[in-house]
Amino acid sequence: MKVMTNVQCASLEELMRHTFVISLTEFFQKREPEIQLVAVDVFKTDNPEQACKKNILLDRKNLKLVKYGAIYDNLRNVFLNSRNLNDFETTLSPVIEKFRAAIKQEKPDIVLVNCTYYLPWCLYVAAKKESVGKVIVYYHGILKKEAEDYEPKTKDILLQMEKSFHIGNDLIVLPSIFAKKTLEKEVVGRELKNWTIVPNPIPDYFFKTRQKEAGAGKNIGAVIRWCDIKNPKFLNEFARYGVENKKRYKVSVVSKPLHNDDILYRKMKKSVNFIDPLSNSNLPLFYSEMDAVVCPSHFETYGNVAQEALASGTPALVSLNMGIADLYREIGIGDWVLDFDDFKTTAGKIEEASFETVSPSIREELRKRLNIDVVYGRFLKDILLPRL
């Protein structure tokens, strides 16, 4: 039994850091060893020799990694030169054809489209062209929200792309009801026909950090991608507020380093301690060293950082506009769901929380609900196996 999905990884080492693929594979190995996950990476190249080759970097019983090179223009030019989604598809036909070749070769029982950006979309188009009967679209972010600050034509093509996932009756997997409602309201324009909710799991190593008695009010942390939707402006304002008012806390942000040409980044470096991106397995140490973690996103379908920090024993303050806010209310920590537009109130709540801790009962509730065996067990039992 084969499940095909898309990945982006330059090497085997990078694949091993791909949390979703590796966690799913390890789970299959324990619970359903006859399932092989075939991970396909179609990478951009200008080398005709690379474009002619198929490289199998790994071929184990439960996991196979296949890489194909495809020659196509840089993405910015693809958007600039496309009038609509049909043009976009034509320009990216080399990518789509490589995915089609992979489908023909592997003959998967299910195609699992992992995310909804242009490469996963190319796999989706390829699956339709090859008449794959069982396709699952696994949402992480919502393109319309992620692209709000893009130029108009690019936004329009991305909206057409996202809508195209909903023309048929393929199963849509979302991480939260909040994500579902946003997708229905802002993208699809109707109720989804065929959907299910699968929250993101929490790896066991986050629960292995030592239980804290209380926070010291000194270290406030955040883990972000550098884009407007993650609201780095709040982190800058909060850090500056701490310095100007001689607060005891300092702010540390895990993020990919930016060039100093970015004005906001340059400003933040004066009051924020930036830390280079960490592997997922190294994040528990970072969280445990923080007295509170802040998630100020303008929009997020779920909120992995927040639940990982909680599992590590550190209070995490989240935005109203995050899918995980519903879980917070369910488990009794709704006071940590904040309106980040109200700076004064939010800053005070963050300071208060930095002297608190996450109770053992909350951590245990998270472990019961969201450990990998529970989440992927349901994914296997209710979604994959009935389709195999």
Image (cartoon, rainbow, N blue to C red):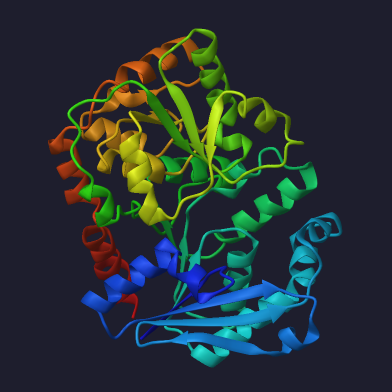
Q: Residue at x 30, y 30 (%)?
A: 315
- On the image, which quarter does residue 360 sit in? top left
Instruction: Identify the residue at horizontal 43%, vertical 36% (top origin).
Output: 322
Q: Is residue 6 above or below residue 59?
A: above
Q: Position of residue 332 (x, y in %)?
A: 21, 29
Image quarter in which the N terminus is found = bottom left
Please give left or right for residue 222 compared with residue 30 in the image. right
Which is nearer the eye, 284 or 15?
A: 284
Q: Is residue 46 above or below residue 268?
A: below
- In the picture, measured across the screen, residue 80 lies left or right of residue 68, that is right
**Residue sitting nearer the eye, 140 or 9:** 9
At 37% from the left edge and 22% from the top edge, which residue is drawn? Answer: 218
> In the displayed structure, would residue 63 be above or below residue 218?
below
Provide residue 71's location: percent of width, then percent of height.
Answer: 77, 76
Tell me where residue 282 appears, x and y as whole percent: 38, 52
Which residue of the protein is positioned furthest toward the bottom in this rendering? 105
Specify the quadrant of the image occupied by residue 45.
bottom right
Please provide percent x and percent y for residue 208.
21, 50
Query: Which one is nearer the viewer's eye here, 149 or 210?
Result: 210
Task: Give me the residue at 21% from left, 25% from top.
Answer: 214
The quadrant of the rendering that contains the C terminus is bottom left
